[in-house]
Amino acid sequence: MSTPVTSSLLKGQTVVVSGIGPGLGSAIALRCAANGANVVLAARTQSRLDELAAQVRDLGVRALTVATDITDEAAAINLRDAALAEFGRVDTLVNNAFVIPSRKPFAETDFQHIRDALELTVFGALRLTQLFTPALEESKGSVVNINSMVLRHSQERFGSYKLAKTALLSMSQSLATELGPKGIRVNSVAPGYIWGPMLQSYFAHQAGKYGTTVEQIYEHTASASDLKRLPEPDQIADAVVFLASPMAIAITGQCLDVNCGEYHN
């Protein structure tokens, strides 16, 4: 992950990021911090949060860590209460939590896996949005939901993932309509392949399995995009920063695709 460039685009804001992980979640938190925001970090694993919080504080802003299972109502309420107790305001909620898709055709997909995906990806995001709505109304803030390029295709073995992410997009659009009169903007970011730790590990596994190289797999995958490369976590995170910032003050109900031109919306 590249070193963020410090600016003041989000200076004075408080951003809550759920689903902190080693890839995109961390990049979003660091990019928001680099643009001046105090950050609330939420995920199930406390040790991961503590490590990232130290990096956030090195950028000269404040960080609060709250171990949270967003599928649990009490834990979600605790996240909201802790954020407001620490900072007194919330300007942006970033719903980034997701579950790895089953990668099976619908004919072989366990219904419980689909239920679990909906509970985390859709209901978890809705739960947090409901809880933070009063604070976001006060700050005239925004919600950014992290979606996926799976919205743009119907490839085999992505059905359950597309089902959850399509529901998330529909929910985001309805929330934009419902929360707009309160001054709250709701937008989505749909990344393509993300050239981060998870994809790099997967490409390395595939290279070993098929006797090729990571570079060859990368080149083949990137060839489907207009820019012939894959977006990196920081580049996805920059789209989130933009939607959270005053530069996007008139944008709501939209989905910003960040896939280097692999799909055109």
Image (cartoon, rainbow, N blue to C red):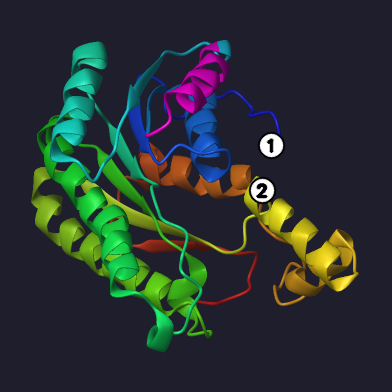
> Is residue 193 found left or right of 151 in the rendered image?
right
Q: Is residue 51 magenta?
A: yes
Foreground: 207 or 184? 207
What SS does tag 2 mark?
loop
Depth order, front residue of 36/224: 224
Which comes sooner in the sequence, label 2 or label 1?
1
Say whether residue 41 is visible: yes
Q: Is residue 104 magenta?
A: no
Does residue 104 sit above or below 243 in this rendering?
A: below
- Local packing at callout 2 (Cα closer than 10 Å; few below 14, some 14-19, many 20+) is some
Q: Amino acid at mark 1?
A: Met
| x then y, percent, for residue 114 | 31, 69
Q: Give the magenta part as a residue range.
A: 44-57
The answer for how far apart the CA atoms under marks 2 and 1 are is 8 Å
Q: Which residue is mark 2?
A: 196
Q: Name which quarter of the figure residue 74 lies in.
A: top left
Helix, strand, or loop for circle 1? loop
Tell me where residue 251 appears, x and y as whole percent: 32, 54
**Labels 2 and 1 touching (C-beta < 8 A):** yes
